Amino acid sequence: MSESGTHPIYRITDLQETDRPRERLASLGPQALANAELIAILLRVGVPGENAVQVGQRLLQKFGGISGLHRAPFNELCNQHGIAEAKAAQIKAAIELGRRLMLESPEERPAINSPADAAALVQYDMGALEQEHLRVVLLDRRNRVLEVVEIYRGSVSSSQVRVGEVFKEAVRKNASGIIVVHNHPSGDPTPSPDDVAVTRAIVQAGKLLDVDVLDHLVIGQGRWVSLKERGLGFG
């Protein structure tokens, strides 16, 4: 423990060696560490009365886990005790790298075999958005993900969404099928009448273009709804 003026700063090195996150990661691998320990490695130092692991625990509790940290506005994270811009940026960057890793390697492209698979692919990211976004998951013939393309940002309504834009990248990249996804920033994924109308128009256009529209998911905070499972817009 070092001193900063009259206030002690609690460092990871103040912990017993067997409890230090970096040493545990080196010996056991990152999968063995709790979320708070991984955050502690990013923070490096704690604050008076809390070591870095305890600060990590406080942040997770405050924001409701990793997904909550992902959703949290940057300024709000900066304002937490012991977290200034540099540490907030490190946390946000680490979470974003994890998100990007999911689709980076072609050899490890996930296959979508159910609505739950599709929801798992996008829930982490889209459940955190503060504005409505419409995205399309492009799939090959084996239902493996080719890409997730953002089509629209704003209110997803039948009067504003141009159906042709939904299929633009699918046609260009010769996708065999698509899954349409949009979020409800309110956190409630209950489909609206406009959601159903948009779905119906997209499904009809897919038949003309010979691109299978496999589903339309509405993403909320920790919840999602498959319009196909509910028979909404798929007739």
Image (spheres, rainbow, N blue to C red):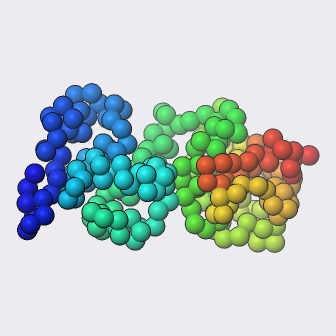
Nearer to me, 193 or 83:
83
Nearer to me, 176 or 62:
62
Image position of 23 with respect to 56: above or below: above
On the rendered structure, is 113 left or right of 103? right
Q: Residue at x 77, y 62 (%)?
A: 163
Q: Position of residue 170 (x, y in %)?
A: 67, 51
Task: Spot the residue most to the top.
Answer: 28
On the rendered structure, is 119 left or right of 1? right
Q: Residue at x 63, y 37 (%)?
A: 117
Tally of numbered tags: 0
Visible residue check, residue 168: no
On the rendered structure, is 58 left or right of 28? right
Task: Spot the residue most to the right.
Answer: 235
Visible residue check, residue 115: yes
Name the quadrant containing residue 14: top left
Image position of 78 with respect to 118: above or below: below
Q: Position of residue 73 (x, y in %)?
A: 46, 67
Q: Position of residue 215 (x, y in %)?
A: 76, 45
Q: Residue at x 29, y 49 (%)?
A: 54
Name the quadrant containing residue 154: bottom right
Q: Position of residue 165 (x, y in %)?
A: 71, 63
Q: Residue at x 28, y 67 (%)?
A: 84
Nearer to me, 48 or 208:
48
